[in-house]
Image (cartoon, grey):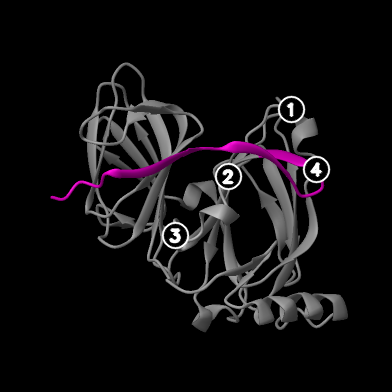
Amino acid sequence: MNFRNIKETFISKPVLEGAGVHLRRAFGYYEVPLFDPFLLFDDFRSNNPQDYLQGFPWHPHRGIETITYVLAGEVEHGDSMGNKGIISAGDVQWMTAGSGIIHQEMPEGDDSGRMYGFQLWANLPAADKMMDPRYRGILDKDIPVVEIGSNVKIRVISGTVNGVQGPVREIVTDPEYLDISLRQNSNFMYEVKNGYTVFVYVIEGNGFFSPDKNTLFKNYDLILFDDGDTIAVSTHSEPVRFLLASGRPIGEPVAWGGPVVMNTEEELNLAFKEYETGTFIKKK
């Protein structure tokens, strides 16, 4: 057993995106390639509708995957492939932009005005940048829950826990995406793959994320780990809930321009030229 040490820590910071959406960004453009294959992680939890109602009107993506996980409220979405609907509490939208997609995401709070959710961007390797786009909408009821003893509960969005596989499969970078809850006064060890990038983001309570228990991490904290095969998590007087993501690094050059991520500046310029001339969408 080779425990992963903490490599770096981050606290999500307020940013303004879309048509005026106030959210918190845990990492993004400047942290590449630290998080390879992941590009960005946004936390859009808010109790104030004025923070999010402007939403994210129609915009393009190419060369990436966007993963939206909603805990409260709803997100109305539509895209150039004809997909449309509502992402409700507990649901996940896993969208592979590939060769190009144009979509919109418009948040709506619940009856109390709450809009709680997260968006993760994952990169695609050069060989798959121009793959056909695809959309996967996963309902809350279709995400399996694994309980380990009486102290640990895991929602398995992608990956496999104790033989239970999440509904999102056949993704290029072999990602794992889990929603993990740990009761107070508990210890938990979780095996991860050597060589994969692994991070956790705390969304409730507080806990320790290393065997030495030197630092207590809380809401809005993100922990990026060094290599190894096991993560140690423990709690004292409070429970903790966190999101865990892992993926196989791509190790390729990144050319990033807003919603488009390619390997070269030439590819990036071509993408925006095609968007301007109406030839961006390759498959409807």
Helix, strand or loop under label 3: loop
Q: From the viewer's perspective, is 225 left or right of 276?
A: left
276 left or right of 247?
A: right
Amino acid on which disc 2 is placed: Phe
**Label 1, on which residue?**
48
Label 1 with label 3: CB-CB less than 8 Å: no
Q: Which residues are magenta?
A: 1-23
Q: Secondary structure at mark 1?
A: loop
Closer mark to the observer between disc 1 and disc 4: 4
Q: Please name the residue shown 59% across and 56% down the image.
A: 29
Residue bearing mark 4: 20
Residue 279: % across, % down? 80, 83
- Identify which residue, 142 or 226, lies in the foreground: 226
> Quick one: label 1 or label 3, which is nearer the N terminus?
1
Mark 3 vs mark 2, foreground winner is 2
Q: Is 24 situated above or below 245?
A: above
